[in-house]
Amino acid sequence: MADESWRRRVLVVEDHALMRSLVADAFDRRGFESASAGSAAEALEVAERFDPDLLVTDIDLRQRPNGVELATIVRARAPHVAVLFLSNLSREAAALHARSIVAGASFVNKAAVESVDELVDAAEAVLADRPVSRELVASDAQARLLALTTAQLETTRLLAAGLTNAEIARRRSVSVRAVEKSVERVFAALGIAGGERTTPRVAAATLYTATFGDASTGL
């Protein structure tokens, strides 16, 4: 019987409400305390107060941040959190890339899972095998990147994807001037200044790509 004085906490992040409920219920039945979210932005708010031991997240959340970016941010803020990625068969390559970015993460292929209990079994394995030595340690620059707001992080992603301010403005349905202000705030938050060999735009793009991988995925 599970020790009622201490229950492992799992944060389930899935954009499909039914799947999210089924997975959370499966963890509850196995003695976990669960919380759930339908997006990365919501998950980050929940994580602050819930303090999970395990993050179970779909990679494709239909909006950014995606599951990989979410896991990177959560792990930077709380390196002890174990990570289990969920994905569809067509996303297997993305999952392999995710494992290379988020140290110690594991991956479950949704298409190959016959019951939600199999997800819990996979999560148990991740928690059992999580080595402390593989925890992600962010650099100072990455820590500043991970501290950006969701909106600022999205602006940085679009910069890294090569979009101009005008293109970002059209995509986000705001004015070019608003984008210019947002970009200026991002550069200030990242402590990036222009130099002889690089521009702030290139420096921000390079930092984003080094942290999260290809920024153009999903454009």
Image (tube, grey):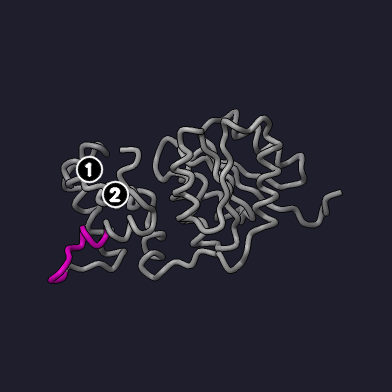
Residue drawn at 55 percent across, 64 percent down:
135
In the shown orientation, is residue 112 left or right of residue 154? right
Position of residue 26 relative to residue 177, above or below, is above
Residue drawn at 65 percent across, 36 percent down:
23
For label 1, the residue is 168
Position of residue 60 relative to residue 211, above or below, is above
Measure how far apart labels 1 and 2 are at the Cα level.
8 Å
Q: Secondary structure at mark 1?
A: helix
Image quarter for residue 57? Answer: top right
Q: Which mark is residue 87?
A: none
Residue drawn at 70 percent across, 41 percent down:
27
- Sequence order check, earlier mark of 1 and 2: 2
In the shown orientation, is residue 3 left or right of residue 24? right
Which residues are drawn in magenta?
A: 195-204
In the depicted view, which residue is nearer to us: 73 or 130? 130
Q: Amino acid at mark 1?
A: Ile
Image quarter for residue 12? Answer: top right
In the shown orientation, is residue 32 left or right of residue 212? right
Q: Residues within 10 Å of mark 2 (few under 14, many from 20)?
A: many
Taking the magenta stretch, the answer to whether it contains residue 138 is no
For label 2, the residue is 155
